Amino acid sequence: MKYAVLLGRIFYSLIFLMASPGHFSKGTIAFAASQGVPFASIAVPLSGVMALLGGLSIALGYKAKWGGLLLALFLVPVTVMLHNFWTVTDPMMAQMQQIMFMKNIAMLGGALLITYFGAGPLSLDARVSTSPVEERPIASREQVIA
């Protein structure tokens, strides 16, 4: 199961690592400004740095709890400001924005899980930890219900 955690971290972080360079383009900054993002010329590149650092942190498993928190802080304003489907009048665009909104909510959930549980056994955090990181057993049905 420890390999599943490693792969999960890598797969999860890819979207942030792939998207972060776009946050430094004039087009992305202009789009954010058109959506009412205040100080878009500063906020958008800053969000790119947050996505890059958070994604790297989680992929490498280094300070992953902080990386998860950084991504959570990135996702909340981005989700609310750029995927506000409730304000879109075109039904097709509203549906697309709702899908993007829900995708970001799912990613926020993942970021919060990493913030709480950390990187897991195959990580830099586990290598530098003073206490061994043990593989957590899958909860039994009774434990889940309790």
Image (cartoon, rainbow, N blue to C red):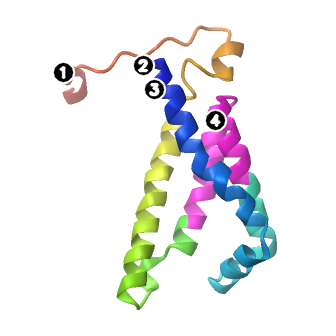
* Residue type, numbered disc 3: Ala
Q: In which quarter of the image is residue 59?
A: top right
Observer-nearest of 25 and 104: 25
- Which mark, by number, is residue 1? 2
* Residue type, numbered disc 1: Glu
Q: Reading the chain from its start, which is encountered first: label 2 or label 1?
A: 2
In which quadrant will I find the C terminus? top left
Q: In which quarter of the image is residue 37?
A: bottom right
Q: Residues within 10 Å of mark 4 (few under 14, many from 20)?
A: many
- Which mark, by number, is residue 121? none
Q: Reading the chain from its start, which is encountered first: label 4 or label 2?
A: 2
Residue 120 pos. (x, y %): 54, 23
Q: Is mark 2 on a helix, strand or loop?
A: loop
Left or right: where 141 falls relative to 135: left
Are discs 2 and 3 less than 8 Å apart at CB? yes
Residue 23 pos. (x, y %): 73, 65
Q: Residues within 10 Å of mark 3 (few under 14, many from 20)?
A: few
Q: Can residue 117 be seen here? A: no
Observer-nearest of 30 and 79: 30
Alpha carbon separation for disc pair 1 and 3: 24 Å
Q: Does the magenta stretch include residue 23?
A: no
Q: Give the range drawn in magenta.
A: 50-78
Are discs 4 and 2 less than 8 Å apart at CB? no
* Residue type, numbered disc 2: Met
Alpha carbon separation for disc pair 4 and 2: 17 Å
Q: Residues within 10 Å of mark 1 (few under 14, many from 20)?
A: few
**Looking at the image, which residue is at 69% across and 29% down?**
62
- Mark 4 highlights which residue? 59
Alpha carbon separation for disc pair 4 and 3: 13 Å
Q: Reading the chain from its start, which is encountered first: label 4 or label 3?
A: 3
- Mark 3 highlights which residue? 4
- Mark 1 highlights which residue? 142
